Image (cartoon, helix red, strand yellow):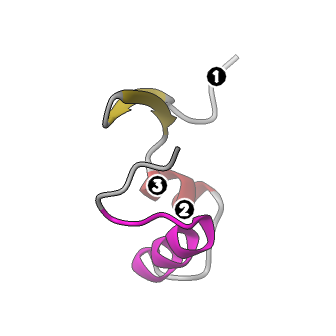
């Protein structure tokens, strides 16, 4: 079976987290919004802040 997305382990601070490519996700969801608008909204909804590691 083929995986839907490549899941990679990325180090954020001292913690390893799973991640996927946001552009690939955007494309596969067939979003009607341009990527920059879409990703900014997703990051806002998730409470992501630049330079901060969510604990």
Which image quarter is the N terminus in?
A: top right
The range drawn in magenta is 35-50
Where does label 3 land, which residue?
22
C-alpha gap between disc 1 and disc 2:
19 Å
Disc 3 versus disc 1: nearer the observer: 3
- CB under 8 Å between discs 3 and 1: no
Where does label 2 land, which residue?
26
Q: Residue at x 44, y 46 (%)?
A: 21
Which quarter of the picture shows residue 9? top left
| Percent coordinates x, y for residue 6 in the rendering | 49, 30
In the displayed orientation, state which residue is furthest to the front.
55
Q: Is residue 51 left or right of residue 17?
A: left
- Label annotation for residue 44: none
Q: Is residue 35 left or right of residue 14?
A: right
Q: Residue at x 57, y 70 (%)?
A: 42
Establish if 53 lies above or below 4: below
**Residue nearest the viewer, comparing 8 with 50:** 50
Query: Tag 3, which secondary structure?
Result: helix
**Label 1 environment density (alpha carbons within 10 Å; few <14, some 14–19, many ≥20):** few
Task: Provide the major secondary structure of the magenta segment.
Answer: helix
Disc 1 versus disc 2: nearer the observer: 2
**Residue nearest the viewer, comparing 43 with 5:** 43
Where does label 1 land, which residue?
2
C-alpha gap between disc 3 and disc 1:
19 Å
| Percent coordinates x, y for residue 41 in the rendering | 54, 78
- CB under 8 Å between discs 2 and 3: yes
Q: Residue at x 60, y 55 (%)?
A: 28
**Label 2 environment density (alpha carbons within 10 Å; few <14, some 14–19, many ≥20):** some
């Amino acid at each position: 079976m083929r995986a839907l997305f490549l899941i990679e382990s990325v180090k954020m601070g001292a913690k390893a987290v799973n991640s996927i490519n946001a552009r690939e996700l955007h494309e596969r969801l067939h979003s009607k919004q341009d990527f920059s608008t879409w990703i900014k909204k997703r990051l806002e909804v998730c409470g992501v802040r630049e330079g901060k590691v969510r604990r």
